[in-house]
Amino acid sequence: MNRPTSHDPHASLVARYVDPEDADGVDDDAVRRRVGLVESVRAGRRWWDANADEYQVEHGDFLGDARFTWCPEGLDEDRVKLLGPVEGRTVLEVGAGAAQCSRRLLARGAFPIALDLSLRQLQHSRRLDAEHGTRVPVVQADAGRLPFADASFDLAFSAYGALPFSPDGAGIMREVFRVLRPGGRWVFSITHPIRWAFPDEPGPEGLTAVASYFDTTPYVEQDHTGRATYVEQHRTLGERVREVVGAGFRLLDIVEPEWPDDLESTWGGWSPLRGRLLPGTAIFVCAKD
Ligand SMILES: C[S@@+](CC[C@H](N)C(=O)[O-])C[C@H]1O[C@@H](n2cnc3c(N)ncnc32)[C@H](O)[C@@H]1O
């Protein structure tokens, strides 16, 4: 397995979503360096296409086929209603994966469209639709260039989609702002920024800060030619707030879900041990006035 523990002491810090074996079976180097937008998007598309099957096998049960959970802490949108009323609303899911959340919104009377960079992830959405007799419209596109007209949606959301992987979070925020109608909401969950300072390990080794929270140099896996094959980004809390506000949104809340007493499951570095001591997720609730 491709554990990012090679020559860079920071390499095991990031919040990996799965522990993938490379598509070609050869381990890549893990480094910290800047990555351009084109290289990053290309790496993301290839990585998620190559790892979508394993991701869905590993996390499908937790996610549920038509459940809307914001995070490994299991915070359920049906309970918290961060999006507000959804019935009759047009909703864009950004970085949807297999669109489990959108499928739940469909059942609640919304009109969702699920967008993702990875064709293979969207094929899993189609598979779930076939199994459940549902039909979530899907679009393959980069979140930084949304293929929709201005003011197309009432609501937009993302559960760990796109933002953790994009070097241009500010650009994604601007695009979402553009396609939302006035009065709309944009709600997104990401790894809580504080986690960047800690090793991404579920056990006690994940409880000691070993790197600077302020160092936003991306985590990159690259092949023998130096080409990025996986990229993960970090922003400090203040930088994320500035991305939100800079796009024109009003920030209503940052929700930091606590780890539930009865939740014993582990998702990568998110575990009961760490979850009871450190925040693992931040959910930004934003409004377009
Ligand atoms: C951790 S998954 C989250 C998906 C879903 N919410 C879930 O919990 O399974 C991240 C998703 O973001 C997508 N993604 C990554 N970069 C993206 C981009 N630039 N534009 C759109 N989607 C992107 C990936 O293909 C992947 O399906």
Image (tube, rainbow, N blue to C red):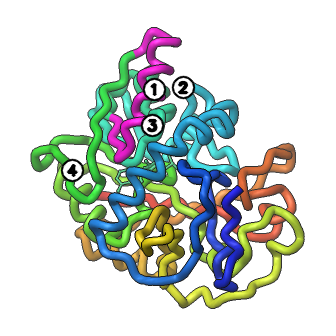
Classify mark 4 as within 8 Å of ligand 1 or not, answering yes or no: no
Q: Is residue 87 magenta?
A: no
- Marks 2 and 4, how far apart in space? 24 Å
- Marks 4 and 3, how far apart in space? 18 Å
In what element is the residue under mark 2?
loop
Q: Which of disc 3 and disc 4 is earlier in sequence?
A: 3
Pointer 2 residue: 66
Q: What residue type is labelled 2?
A: Ala
Pointer 3 residue: 121
Q: Which of disc 4 and disc 1 is earlier in sequence?
A: 1
- Between residue 46 and residue 233, name the one nearer to us: 46
Question: Dot 4 surroundings within 10 Å: few (below 14), some, or many (20 or more)?
Answer: some
Q: Which of disc 2 and disc 3 is earlier in sequence?
A: 2
Classify mark 3 as within 8 Å of ligand 1 or not, answering yes or no: yes
- Between residue 197 and residue 56, name the one nearer to us: 56
> Does any portion of residue 51 appear in the rendered image?
yes
Pointer 4 residue: 146
Question: In this picture, which residue range is highlighted in magenta?
Answer: 114-134
Of tags 4 and 3, the one toward the viewer is 3
Pointer 1 residue: 103
Q: Residue 123's spot in the image, x, y percent?
A: 42, 28
Left or right of 179 in this view: 218 = right
Of tags 1 and 4, the one toward the viewer is 4
